[in-house]
Image (cartoon, grey):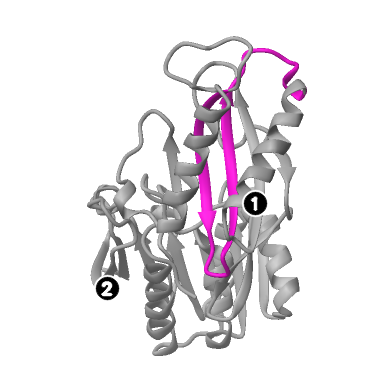
């Protein structure tokens, strides 16, 4: 079962953009939450905190192809006694379960006292439902938690993974070193193209989700490594010759390409070509574009798959 439109959505209640690009089920979820806020005389936060009622600020939601969803509610609350709202949180959970048709709803909340969005490393709190939800990636069950990395569009994600699988199957090496976004699902998709795969993540949440996914799927040739500063990644590259490197960089780029000296094949996945071009302008590297995938419907951003070549 594939989804229609963006299935990973973040929005502020008072500043909703590009709603027409969302999966229709997430649009319905948003409408239900707004309806709940209005029916129960809560507040949508807009620069001024309202005392004695819940101040709804923002939502992060991920809907999977298995019709499982996590919903992270963000509230503005400048005090330390938020537990007094536990009954209301339970009521929100009941309301969503009674008025939606998701197979699983994992509901969480996060607070911001400074009236700004909390960082993704700040504590999130469980409300109800399963702790984990799963995405179906080419028949592998991939665990997803709130604030772990996930692609925003299911159909485009599968197209991206299929293209990378095709590229790596045409020029096989013994080892794959994969650093960055999508470490766990791509490692699963590519497991038959390599004898051993090292997947590196700087995010502890994504790393832990990855460990559960590897165990769930019984894959034996994937080794996941928590590597906050890329140090283990660079050390391992220096030890091996017959390897393929894949880096999936953030919009700010990888930033340390100058440290990579030795490789058999190097695939770079860029979601911001400007950052990539800025990074290689003083390096002896040329590149060829192997493909582009529109991962972010409604925006100008694309995922560009590049083959990097030392000059």
Quadrant occupied by the C terminus: bottom left
Q: Residue 178: where, in percent of width, then height? A: 52, 66
Question: What segment carries the magenta color?
Answer: 55-83
Residue 97, disc: 1
Q: Residue at x 66, y 74 (%)?
A: 222
Say which quarter of the image contains residue 273: bottom left
Relative to 123, 300 lies left or right: left
The answer to whether residue 143 is above or below residue 109 is below
User: Of residues 211 and 308, which is closer to you in this image?
Assistant: 211
Mark-to-mark CA distance, 2 and 1:
41 Å
User: In the image, which disc is placed on residue 57?
Assistant: none
Check if residue 151 falls in the magenta segment: no
Q: Is residue 75 magenta?
A: yes
Q: Is residue 219 above or below residue 69?
A: below
Q: Which residue is mark 2?
A: 291
Q: Residue at x 41, y 88 (%)?
A: 171
Left or right, 141 with reference to 268:
right
Q: Residues within 10 Å of mark 1 (few under 14, many from 20)?
A: some
Tell me, yes or no, if residue 165 can be seen here: yes
Residue 221 at x, y percent in the picture? 67, 80
In the picture, measured across the screen, residue 101 lies left or right of residue 283, that is right
Which badge, 2 or 1, is on the more N-terminal residue? 1
């Amino acid at each position: 079962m594939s989804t229609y439109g963006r299935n990973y959505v973040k929005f502020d209640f008072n500043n909703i953009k590009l709603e027409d690009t969302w999966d229709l089920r997430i649009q319905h979820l948003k409408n239900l939450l707004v309806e709940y806020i209005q029916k129960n005389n809560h507040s949508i936060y807009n620069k001024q905190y309202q005392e004695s009622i819940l101040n709804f600020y923002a939502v992060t939601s991920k809907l999977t192809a298995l019709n499982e969803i996590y919903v992270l509610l963000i509230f503005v609350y400048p005090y330390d006694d938020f537990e007094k709202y536990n009954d209301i949180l339970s009521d929100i959970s009941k309301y969503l379960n009674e008025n939606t048709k998701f197979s699983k709803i994992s509901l969480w909340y996060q607070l911001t006292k400074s009236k700004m969005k909390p960082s993704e490393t700040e504590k999130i709190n469980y409300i109800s439902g399963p702790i984990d939800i799963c995405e179906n990636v080419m028949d592998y069950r991939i665990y997803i938690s709130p604030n772990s990395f996930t692609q925003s569009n299911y159909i485009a994600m599968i197209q991206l993974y299929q293209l990378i699988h095709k590229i790596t199957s045409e020029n096989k090496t013994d080892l794959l070193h994969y650093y960055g976004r999508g470490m766990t699902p791509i490692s699963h998709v590519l497991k038959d193209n390599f004898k051993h795969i090292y997947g590196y993540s700087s995010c502890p949440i994504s790393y832990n989700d990855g460990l559960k996914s590897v165990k769930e799927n019984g894959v034996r040739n994937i080794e996941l490594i928590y590597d906050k500063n890329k140090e283990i990644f660079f050390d391992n590259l220096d030890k091996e010759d017959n390897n393929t490197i894949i880096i999936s960089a953030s919009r700010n780029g990888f930033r340390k390409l100058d440290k990579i000296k030795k490789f058999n094949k190097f695939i770079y996945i860029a979601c911001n070509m400007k950052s990539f071009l800025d990074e290689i302008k003083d390096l002896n590297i040329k590149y060829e574009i192997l493909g582009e995938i529109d991962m972010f419907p409604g925006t100008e951003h694309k995922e560009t798959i590049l083959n990097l070549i030392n000059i």
